[in-house]
């Protein structure tokens, strides 16, 4: 397994069934992806899941987070998975085989998070707002959703099945999700202070701002520049309000 696969993190968001978490961990161990992150698991005893046969060490080292933002803060690419169904998506949607190629290329230069939602409803709109784009497995229309462990296994299989096609590229270091989140927060604050966003519209605007900033695909250097600009803008806005 290539060393850069150590940069791939599987993130399970609000999983409800410990057996599904165990099955996901077993699939990860099968394919050599050893970094599991869990956001608000429903069952705290998931580390003892019997379905994690052969993957107990991986499950024991799984990191728990209270939010998606915290779980992906050190990642330069965040990819969500979805069954699509009847929801209106605000992100680019890529088939599994094409998305896997993009993920392999990004692993040459930065950490990637692959998000899977809760078994019942999948990723929420707020969860999706942290993603750069989405990926789905082409299942039949009459039965689109997959078991969590199966979905993890299929996605990871596609990532590793033809590694020879993954050619290293010299790419500029991308901004981490944490840096992008700080830009989103700073921009939203500037919009609020300036009066562009009213209190009643903060939540939907926050999701739109996140998606907008992620579509820019900023480098780490550009993210630092934008953060500096936002700090200066906020300083001016606050100063102007104090003088009036």
Image (cartoon, rainbow, N blue to C red):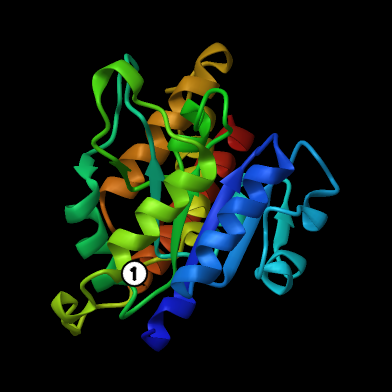
Q: Who's the residue at 53% across and 23% down the image?
A: 121
Q: Which residue occupies the foreground of this view, 109 or 32?
A: 32
Left or right placement of residue 57 versus residue 144 in this view: right
Q: Position of residue 35 (x, y in %)?
A: 58, 69
Q: Who's the residue at 30% across and 80% down the image?
A: 108
Quadrant housing residue 54:
bottom right
Rendered position, 83 above or below 198: below
Q: Position of residue 96 (x, y in %)?
A: 24, 49
Quadrant housing residue 98:
bottom left
Left or right placement of residue 137 versus residue 210 in this view: left
Q: Who's the residue at 68% across and 53% down the image?
A: 51
Quarter of the rendering occupied by the N terminus? bottom left
Quadrant housing residue 200:
top right
Q: Who's the residue at 58% across and 43% down the image?
A: 239
Rendered position, 219 above or below 227: below
Q: Which residue occupies the foreground of this view, 17 or 181?
A: 17
Seen as rendered, the residue at the extreme bottom is: 3
Rendered position, 36 above or below 86: below
Secondary structure found at label 1: loop
* Circle count: 1
Crowding at mark 1 (Cα within 10 Å: few <14, some 14-19, many 20+)? many
Left or right placement of residue 5 versus residue 132 in this view: right
Q: Which residue occupies the foreground of this view, 32 or 134?
A: 32
Seen as rendered, the residue at the extreme right is: 45
The residue pinned by badge 1 equals 174
Q: Which residue occupies the foreground of this view, 171 or 237?
A: 171
Quarter of the rendering occupied by the C terminus? top right
Rendered position, 183 above or below 103: above
Q: Position of residue 171 (x, y in %)?
A: 22, 79
Q: Position of residue 222 (x, y in %)?
A: 32, 67
Residue 40 in view (yes/no): no
Residue 202 in view (yes/no): yes
């Amino acid at each position: 397994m290539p060393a850069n696969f150590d940069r791939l993190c599987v993130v399970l968001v609000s999983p409800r069934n410990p057996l599904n978490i165990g099955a996901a961990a077993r699939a990860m161990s099968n394919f050599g992806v050893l970094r599991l992150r869990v956001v608000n698991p429903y069952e705290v005893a998931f580390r003892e899941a019997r379905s994690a046969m052969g993957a107990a060490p991986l499950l024991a080292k799984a990191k728990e987070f209270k939010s998606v933002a915290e779980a992906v803060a050190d990642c330069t690419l965040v990819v969500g998975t979805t069954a699509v169904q009847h929801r209106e998506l605000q992100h680019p949607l890529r088939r599994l085989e094409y998305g896997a190629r993009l993920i392999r290329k990004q692993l040459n230069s930065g950490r990637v998070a692959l998000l899977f939602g809760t078994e019942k409803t999948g990723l929420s709109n707020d969860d999706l707002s942290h993603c750069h784009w989405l990926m789905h497995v082409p299942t039949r229309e009459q039965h689109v959703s997959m078991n969590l462990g199966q979905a993890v296994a299929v996605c990871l299989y596609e990532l590793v099945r033809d590694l020879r096609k993954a050619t290293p590229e010299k790419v500029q270091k991308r901004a981490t999700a944490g840096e992008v989140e700080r830009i989103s927060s700073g921009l939203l604050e500037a919009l609020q202070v300036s009066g562009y966003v009213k209190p009643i519209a903060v939540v939907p605007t926050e999701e739109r701002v996140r998606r907008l900033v992620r579509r820019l695909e900023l480098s780490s250097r550009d993210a630092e520049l934008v953060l500096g600009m936002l700090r200066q803008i906020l300083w001016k806005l606050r100063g102007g309000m104090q003088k009036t």
